Image (cartoon, grey):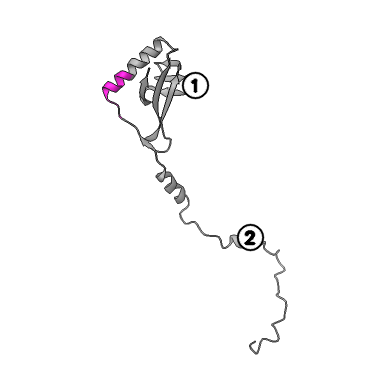
C-alpha cells in the first residue's frame, strides 16, 4: 500500500445527510442508453413491413365482376368464391388480398357501392378482384 494514506484508508464513507440513498434501479437508469432518434426503429419496421400492391383491372375483368354481381343480386342465395383487396391504413397503395371460398352475399348496395357477405364483411365494389360463381 502507498504511504501517506494510512490516516484515511479505514474511515467510513461520509454519505450525504440531505437526501435518501438512491436505489439500484434509479442508479442504473442514469446509465441507460440514450435514444437520439426516437421512433426511428418503429419507422424502419413499418417500412420493412411487406404489403401487396393493388392490381389494376382491365375493363374486361371489371365487366365480368359486374355480371357476377348482377347474377348474385338476382339470387342472393348463390354461392360464390371472391377475391378482394383490403387497403392498408398506413401505406398508400399497399394492402393485402383475401380469398373467400363458397360464401354467400347478405346484401348488395348499389347506392353505397359495396357487397356485404353473410359473415357481415363489407367489400367495396372497387376492391373486388374476382368473383367465381
- What is the span of residues highlighted in magenta in the rendered image? 56-64
Mark 2 element type: helix
Which residue is more in the foreground, 16 or 43? 43
**Vertically, is 13 above or below 105?**
below
**Quadrant of the snapshot with the C terminus:** top left
Residue 19 picture quarter = bottom right
Kindly tell me whether residue 69 is visible in this rendering: yes
Q: Position of residue 93 (x, y in %)?
A: 36, 35
**Vertically, is 88 above or below 9?**
above
Q: Is residue 58 magenta?
A: yes
User: Mark 1 sits on what residue?
Assistant: 120
* Label 1 vs 2, first from the N-terminus: 2
User: Mark 2 sits on what residue?
Assistant: 26
Mark 1 element type: loop
Kindly tell me whether residue 92 is visible in this rendering: no
Q: Residues within 10 Å of mark 1 (few under 14, many from 20)?
A: few
Q: CA distance from mark 1 to mark 2?
A: 52 Å
Residue at point 58%, 62% (across, down): 30
Residue at point 70%, 70% (across, down): 16
Residue 132 picture quarter = top left
Q: Position of residue 12 (x, y in %)?
A: 72, 76
Q: Main secondary structure of the magenta part?
A: helix
Amino acid at each position: 500500500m502507498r504511504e501517506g494514506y494510512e490516516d484515511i484508508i479505514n474511515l467510513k464513507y461520509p454519505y450525504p445527510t440531505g437526501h435518501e440513498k438512491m436505489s439500484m434501479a434509479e442508479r442504473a437508469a442514469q446509465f441507460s442508453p440514450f435514444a437520439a432518434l426516437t421512433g426511428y426503429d418503429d419507422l424502419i419496421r413499418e417500412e420493412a413491413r411487406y404489403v401487396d400492391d393493388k392490381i389494376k383491372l382491365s375493363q374486361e375483368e371489371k365487366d365480368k365482376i359486374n355480371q357476377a354481381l348482377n347474377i348474385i343480386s338476382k339470387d342472393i342465395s348463390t354461392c360464390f368464391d371472391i377475391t378482394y383487396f383490403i387497403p392498408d391504413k398506413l401505406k398508400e397503395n399497399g394492402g393485402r388480398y383475401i380469398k373467400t371460398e363458397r360464401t354467400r352475399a347478405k346484401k348488395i348496395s348499389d347506392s353505397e357501392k359495396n357487397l356485404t357477405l353473410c359473415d357481415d364483411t363489407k367489400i367495396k365494389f372497387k376492391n373486388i378482384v374476382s368473383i367465381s360463381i
